[in-house]
Image: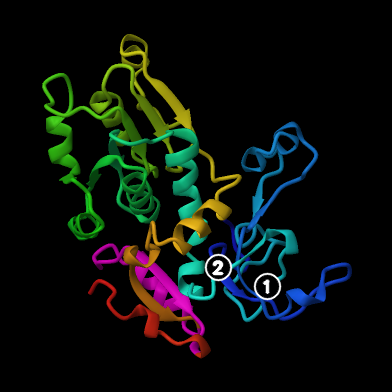
Amino acid sequence: MVPPLVLGHEFAGEIVEVGPGVPVDLVGRRVAVDPVVSCGVCEACLEGRTNICNDYRVLGCRPGLPGAFAEMVAVDANKTWELPDDCSFLVGALIQPLAVSHHAVVDRAEVGVGDEVLILGAGPVGLGALMLALSEGATATVVDIDPYRLGIAQRLGADRTLIADQAASMAGEGAQTRPRIVLECAGGTQSSTLALATAWCRPGGRIVIVGNFTEGTEGVDPVAVKVKELDVLGSQAYSDSYGPLLEMIRSRRIDPIRMVSHALPLDNPSAGLELLDDVHSDKAKVVMTAKEHGLAESAGLFP
């Protein structure tokens, strides 16, 4: 993302105006928004896999596609999803990152009852993956470098949490528990999580790479992939996760607000960005909300 641009691709709000050809009864509807913009005509789009479109773009991530760090934002009406009456805008804003987790857990990893899952990275996508894996009947171990985020993973129901260095020393042939599924949700400039994934994954298991890495990152051992017959899959964004997630929220199968550490007023976005940028501060998911919607829904968030 290169400035100048208006950020904000994870958001929910109220429809206040519609353009030509859009039903006027949409005005006033409370919606979560899918910010993905795809071409609709490439092979991937025609197969329904808009997440791997040849011209994949996202609102708030490209100049010319302004996002939701503003009073209003223009979106495609077909990309809006009505929120349940008891679903707050705060929760609605979490649908987008949860959709990334849902695609990885349900569509790519195909996590099921009784699966042992290792999640590398306890950021919002990793914590979302944890909630979804548990909802599918799996057991889960979460690894991160941040004790605060591991504490949240514990409160969300992780069967085990490990500091990264501890996890590395326990990986390999001598490990007592070796997961069938490993979800790499950290990414970044490091590559140790990829090596850890191949070391931990049991023979015949599956590794799903969810994190965003810098180009040219190395780390998946091709010898281990061959000898252990591992499936190594990529997971890019999502294509059909909003509907299932809204139903899970409606039926109380998952409670996304449990991974939010801070709810801050939208009229001071720099406070949220500075919090994210401070490597010494404790935080997980930071959400900003407009004053008129209040912050009462943040009651009970982790200190």
The reply to whether dot 2 and dot 1 touch (C-beta < 8 Å) is yes
Whole-percent x, y for residue 68 in the image: 60, 71
| Residue corresponding to mark 2 | 11
Mark 2 or mark 1, which has the lower sequence index?
2
- Vertical comparison of 41 with 8: above or below: above
Quadrant including the N terminus: bottom right
Quadrant housing residue 194:
top left
| Residue hosting label 1 | 73
Screen quadrant of the C terminus: bottom left
> Which residue lies at the image location 46% right of the left edge and 69% below the top edge?
91
In the rendered image, the residue lying farthest to the front is: 251
Spot occupied by residue 167 in the image (x, y as percentages of width and height) = 17, 37
Position above or below: 158 against 152: above
- Residue 289 in the image: x percent, y percent? 48, 79
Is residue 273 among what the camera can see? Answer: no
Q: Position of residue 226 (x, y in %)?
A: 37, 11
The span picked out in magenta is: 267-291
User: In the image shown, does 253 or 292 lie closer to the viewer?
Assistant: 253
Residue name at image x 74 percent, y 74 percent: 26
Q: Which mark is residue 136?
A: none
Residue at the spot 33% in from the left edge and 31% down from the top edge: 181
